[in-house]
Amino acid sequence: MANDGKYMSEVHEVTLIVENIERSREFYENVLGFKRIEKPGSRVELGAGGCSIVLEEDFEEEVFAQYNLRKPTGKRGNGLVLELNVDDVEKIYENAVSMGVEILTEPKVMWGRNHFLLEDPDGYVLGIGKSV
């Protein structure tokens, strides 16, 4: 049975398991300009259009086991590129460079987007781009 789009309406949230939630919050707010959505609890939820990016600090091993997950090790972003649409690619690039962020590719036009890649403090790879 082909999926004609009637089952999936939108992505609700993307959760990133991070080593240090304050360090990651500062990165997403100060480098990329995300705004925090104030909600109770230990997680940090950041507004991203119709979807939220949620930062969760490492769980205890028992919590990972309850969800049949393994605790991330090494660079957490291996195999994942989270693509973000932004209004000003150059501004974010310059901000990231000035703050010493790991830049993986310089901004360039590819696949109809002005686009570059960077790494967050936990090794998640983020694509920063805008359609051209």
Image: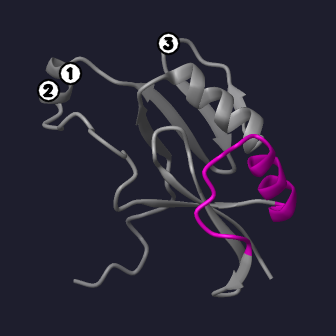
Circle 3/circle 2 CB separation < 8 Å: no
Spatial CA span between label 2 and label 1? 5 Å
Point out which mark residue 63 bears. 1
Spatial CA span between label 3 and label 1? 16 Å
Tell me the residue at 42%/71% (across/down). 6
Please, what secondary structure does the residue beneath circle 2 have?
helix
Tell me the residue at 56%/44% (across/down). 120
Tag 2 residue: 66
Tell me the residue at 22%/33% (across/down). 71
Give residue 37's quadrant in the image.
Answer: top right
Circle 2/circle 1 CB separation < 8 Å: yes
Quick one: 96 or 42, which is closer to the camera? Answer: 96
**Quadrant where the image shows the C terminus:** bottom right
Residue 81 x/y as whole percent:
47, 62
Amino acid type, callout 3: Gly
Spatial CA span between label 3 and label 2? 19 Å
**In the rendered image of this protein, does residue 22 appear above or below residue 14?**
above
Circle 3/circle 1 CB separation < 8 Å: no
**In the rendered image of this protein, does residue 38 appear above or below residue 6?**
above
Tell me the residue at 66%/35% (across/down). 27
Look at the image and give the residue range highlighted in magenta: 87-107
Q: Residues within 10 Å of mark 2 (few under 14, many from 20)?
A: few
Coloring basis for residues: one colour
Amino acid type, callout 1: Val
Tag 3 residue: 41
**Quadrant where the image shows the N terminus:** bottom left
Residue 129 x/y as whole percent:
71, 68
Q: Magenta segment: does it hold 70?
A: no
Q: Residues within 10 Å of mark 1 (few under 14, many from 20)?
A: few
